[in-house]
Image: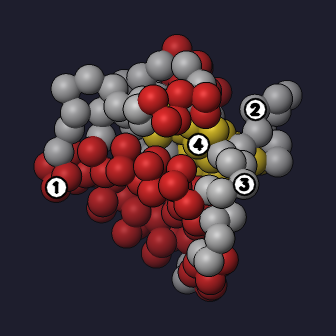
């Protein structure tokens, strides 16, 4: 977790739009986000690419999704826990913070490194479809 300089972005989830797993998680969050707290940007979009670079994420070889929330940037397992904990009935995931971050991030890293092989890759960037257009930042 790092401070976000000049943080005008808020409640933005940065995801890999060609990753089937990442796109599926985008839909999972969007369906459960009744308060419509989160907005989304794919790392392949101009906005997402700039956001990734500002967070120290290589947009050509992304190794993590990220969340900008409350002028803070979360990466890896911290981002996943923070996003899920804001969804109705998912607050219990905060308990995962008792697991040391290096262990959580190691598990996250295994999935991240193998996500295309395990889950596949879209030919084009998945922007979530028409139902999410008002929540997609490009």
Residue 136 x %, y %: 56, 29
- Left-right relation of 131 to 2: left
Q: Residue at x 61, y 33 (%)?
A: 135
Identify which residue, 18 or 79, lies in the foreground.
18
Q: Secondary structure at mark 1?
A: helix
Bin the neighbour count of mark 4 within 10 Å (Cα to Cα): few under 14, some 14-19, many 20 and up: many
Sequence-wise first label, 4 or 3 = 4
Q: Looking at the rendering, which quadrant does residue 58 occupy?
A: top left
Residue 73 x %, y %: 69, 46
Q: Secondary structure at mark 3?
A: loop
The C terminus - image quarter: top right
Bin the neighbour count of mark 1 within 10 Å (Cα to Cα): few under 14, some 14-19, many 20 and up: few
**In the image, residue 115 above or below residue 8:** below
Sequence-wise first label, 4 or 1 = 4
Mark 2 highlights which residue? 9
Distance (Cα) linking label 4 and label 3: 15 Å
Distance (Cα) linking label 4 and label 2: 10 Å
Q: Residue at x 58, y 42 (%)?
A: 13
Distance (Cα) linking label 1 and label 2: 32 Å
Mark 4 highlights which residue? 13
Distance (Cα) linking label 4 and label 1: 22 Å
Identify which residue, 9 or 127, lies in the foreground.
127
Distance (Cα) linking label 3 and label 2: 18 Å
Residue 122 x %, y %: 22, 33
- Left-right relation of 6 to 92: right
Residue 9 appears in the rendering: yes
* Mark toward the viewer: 4 or 3: 3
The circle on residue 35 is: 3
Mark 1 highlights which residue? 118
Residue 5 appears in the rendering: no
Marks 4 & 3, CB-CB < 8 Å contact: no
The N terminus - image quarter: bottom right
């Amino acid at each position: 977790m790092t401070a976000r300089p000049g943080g005008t972005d808020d409640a933005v989830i940065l995801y890999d739009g060609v990753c089937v797993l990442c796109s599926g998680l985008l839909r999972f969050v969007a369906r459960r986000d009744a308060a419509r707290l989160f907005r989304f940007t794919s790392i392949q979009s101009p906005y997402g690419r700039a956001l990734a670079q500002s967070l120290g994420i290589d947009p050509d070889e992304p190794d993590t999704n990220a969340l900008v929330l409350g002028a803070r940037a979360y990466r890896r397992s911290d981002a996943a826990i923070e996003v899920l904990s804001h969804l109705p009935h998912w607050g219990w995931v905060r308990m995962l913070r008792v697991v040391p971050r290096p262990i959580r991030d190691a598990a996250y890293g295994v999935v991240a490194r193998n996500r295309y092989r395990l889950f596949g890759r879209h030919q084009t960037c998945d922007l979530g479809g028409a139902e999410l257009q008002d929540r997609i930042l490009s």
